[in-house]
Amino acid sequence: MPQIPAARNTLAILRYLASRSGPVPAASLARALDLPRSSAYQLIAVLMDEGFVVHYPEDRTYGLSSLVAELGTASLRSTRLARLASPLMEKLVASAPIPVVAHLAVLSGTDVVYAARVQGLRAPMTVSAIGVHLPAHLTATGRAMLALLPATQVRALYPSKRQLTLRTAIGPSSLTALDGVLADTRARGWATELGEITAEYGSVGAAAVDRNDYPAAAIGLTFRTDAVGDEWTTLGRATAATTDALSARLSGR
C-alpha cells in the first residue's frame, strides 16, 4: 500500500471534523490525531484554500465547509438518499388528511436543493421541482436543517448582517429574526412556513440526521392554506416521524 503521509493525514482531518458536533481548535485536532501542530496548521491552511474547511475566528476553531456536504449529497441526491426516502414520502402523502406534496431537500450553503418529490391526489402545484434551489431560511425544510446546526455554523453560513432575502415580503429579514424562527423550530420539533415561498401556500418540514447527527436532508409537506384547518400539528408530527424513520435508515440504527 502506498505510503503518502500527507494524503492520509488530510483525510484523517476531514474524517475527524466530520465526526465532531461543532468546530474544534487546531490544537485539539492535532492532539487527537497525534500530528505535529505545525503540520496540522499547514494541512488545515491547504484545506481552507481549497474550500473544504472554514475558520471561525471568534472561537479560534475550524470546521467543515458546506462544500464537503455538497460533494456528499450530490451522489446521495441521485441514488441512495432518494431511494431511501421515496417510499417513506409516499406513505406520508397517502396518510395526510388533506392534499399535499412531499419533497425531499438537502442543504447547499444557504439554499435548499430539492432531490425528490411525491405528488398526492388533488395536490397543488408547487415550485419544489427536483433540482430547484430556494433560500433555506424561507423554507420549512431549510429551517428544519438549519435548526439542527450549531449556532456558530449558522453564523458562518450567514456572516453578513445585511437584510436577508425575501420572496413575498414575509419571513425573517434579519439574523436576529432567523434565530427566533430556528429557536421555535427546535422547541416544536418541526418547522413551518406560511406564504413565504408562494402566497396562499404553507409547509411543514423536519430534518433527518446521519450517524453523526448532522442534518443530511429534510422532508417537507406543502399544501394550500385554505385547505388546512387544525391539521398543522398532525402534519408536522407525521413529517417528523417520517424523518425519524429516514434517520434510522441513514444511520443504520
Image: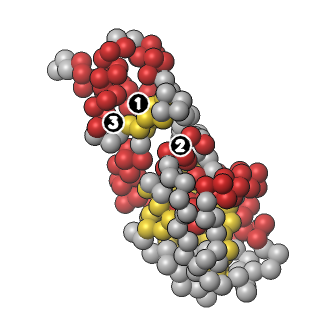
Identify residue for label 3: 48
Q: Please tell me in which quadrant of the rendered image residue 100 appears.
A: bottom right
Q: Tell me the SS state at disc 2.
A: helix
Q: What amino acid is labelled 2 in the image?
A: Gln
Image quarter in which the N terminus is found: top left
Q: Is residue 144 above or below residue 27?
A: below
Residue 185 point in image, percent of width and height? 70, 56
The disc at residue 131 is none
- For image coordinates 55% across by 63% down, the residue present is 163
Identify residue for label 2: 153
Q: Please tell me in which quadrant of the rendered image residue 109 appears.
A: bottom left
Identify residue for label 1: 15
For the residue pair 237 and 50, the one nearer the viewer reads as 50
Q: Is residue 249 above or below residue 223?
A: above
Marks 3, 1: nearer the viewer:
3
Q: Tell me the SS state at disc 3.
A: helix
